[in-house]
């Protein structure tokens, strides 16, 4: 594989050093490197041409999955394989674990990081809908200090985020509480493929629902109309689910591209929403299957 531009490479030992490199005057700019699963492809295709790559993989400050101040903390360098295998994530953020299991392939999951995934900010990023329904917070380190950005304020457009130049995502925090949910990802075939559409659903013990979509708008988005329709009911009946599925199709703005048509994506959002709501309700009641189910291949109870 050829790379379309020349660049320097640095691997800082500390977060402070990395911040200095990213903020420094570099011809062509400096780009952070984590898993590299998106960045390397963009370098190959000539979509980006930084003058310096700053390798963040060795930074201890960006690693780890732990409980912190009654929240689940994911270091930005946590890989999707680590998320999938973490008992803490499976217990406190199982929707994210379910999404992680549908990321590309084993090889990609072993390298791709959750911080890199949200910084790439492609409309089909798998972690986006899950983090939105968890009302996650993105914690950013800068040379001036740290700041926190809500997940619903993070995505600004395709490959555009609220991360200011020179900043580094240090981690992501997710509030803890009893809930259940489901994640559905539509692909063209089994195996490694980007999402044609995705849906994440979360419901808590009060009957408060959160819904988010991926690959059907310029960014991952919440579904407020469906959330309001379902609010207060922990086990929505079939007629209400049908209404929610129809309403979901009005909340999305898909496009036609090589992975699917506008009409097909919109229709499948309704199908996935119905199945995800049904599965989330069953899991909340303690009778649903374990997380990791592909609900487009195996129907929910």
Image: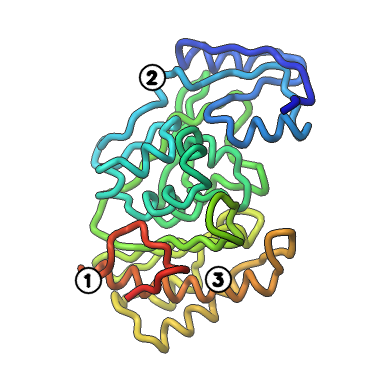
Q: Which mark is residue 132?
A: none
| Residue 169 x %, y % | 49, 31
For the image, the number of numbered tags is 3
Q: Nearer the viewer, residue 3 or 238?
A: 3
Earlier-in-chain disc, 2 versus 1: 2
The residue wearing badge 1 is: 287
Residue visible at 78% across and 32% down in the picture: 46
Which quadrant of the figure has residue 180?
Answer: bottom left
The residue wearing badge 2 is: 60
- What secondary structure is found at the residue carrying circle 2? helix
| Residue 185 x %, y % | 51, 60
Q: Is residue 126 left or right of residue 196?
A: left
- What secondary structure is found at the residue carrying circle 1? loop
The residue wearing badge 3 is: 269
What colouring style does the render use? rainbow
Q: Residues within 10 Å of mark 1 (few under 14, many from 20)?
A: few
Q: Is residue 256 left or right of residue 171?
A: right
| Residue 203 x %, y % | 33, 66
| Residue 121 x %, y % | 60, 44
Q: Nearer the viewer, mark 2 or mark 1?
A: 1
Q: Residues within 10 Å of mark 3 (few under 14, many from 20)?
A: many
Q: Nearer the viewer, mark 1 or mark 3?
A: 1
Earlier-in-chain disc, 2 versus 3: 2
Earlier-in-chain disc, 1 versus 3: 3
Residue farthest to the bottom?
239
Q: CA distance from mark 2 to mark 3?
A: 39 Å
Q: Is residue 254 left or right of residue 2?
A: left
Does residue 212 show up?
Answer: no
Relative to 198, is 231 above or below? below
């Amino acid at each position: 594989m050829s790379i379309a531009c020349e660049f320097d490479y640095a691997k800082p030992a500390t977060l402070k050093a990395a911040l200095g490199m990213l903020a420094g005057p570099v011809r062509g700019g400096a780009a952070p490197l984590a898993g590299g699963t998106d960045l390397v492809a963009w370098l190959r295709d000539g979509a980006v041409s930084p003058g310096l790559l700053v390798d963040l993989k060795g930074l201890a400050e960006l690693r780890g999955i732990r409980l912190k101040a009654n929240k689940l903390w994911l270091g930005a360098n946590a890989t999707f394989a680590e998320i999938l295998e973490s008992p803490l994530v499976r217990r406190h953020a199982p929707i994210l674990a379910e999404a992680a299991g549908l990321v590309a392939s084993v090889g990609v999951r072993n390298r791709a990081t959750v911080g890199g995934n949200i910084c790439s900010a492609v409309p089909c990023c798998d972690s986006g809908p899950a983090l939105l329904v968890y009302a996650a917070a993105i914690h950013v380190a800068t040379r001036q200090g740290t700041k926190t950005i809500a997940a619903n304020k993070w995505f600004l457009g395709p490959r555009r985020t609220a991360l200011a130049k020179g900043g580094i995502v240090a981690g992501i925090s997710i509030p803890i509480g009893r809930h259940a949910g489901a994640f559905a990802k539509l692909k063209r075939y089994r195996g490694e493929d980007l999402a044609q559409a995705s849906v994440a659903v979360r419901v808590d013990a009060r009957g408060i629902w959160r819904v988010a979509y991926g690959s059907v708008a310029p960014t991952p988005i919440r579904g407020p109309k469906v959330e309001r329709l379902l609010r207060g009911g922990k086990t929505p009946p079939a007629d209400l689910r049908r209404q929610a599925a129809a309403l979901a199709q009005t909340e999305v703005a898909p496009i036609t591209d090589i992975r699917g048509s506008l009409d097909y994506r919109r229709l499948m959002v309704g199908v996935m929403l119905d199945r995800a709501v049904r599965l989330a309700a069953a899991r909340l009641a303690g009778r649903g299957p374990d997380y990791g189910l592909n609900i487009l291949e195996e129907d929910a109870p």
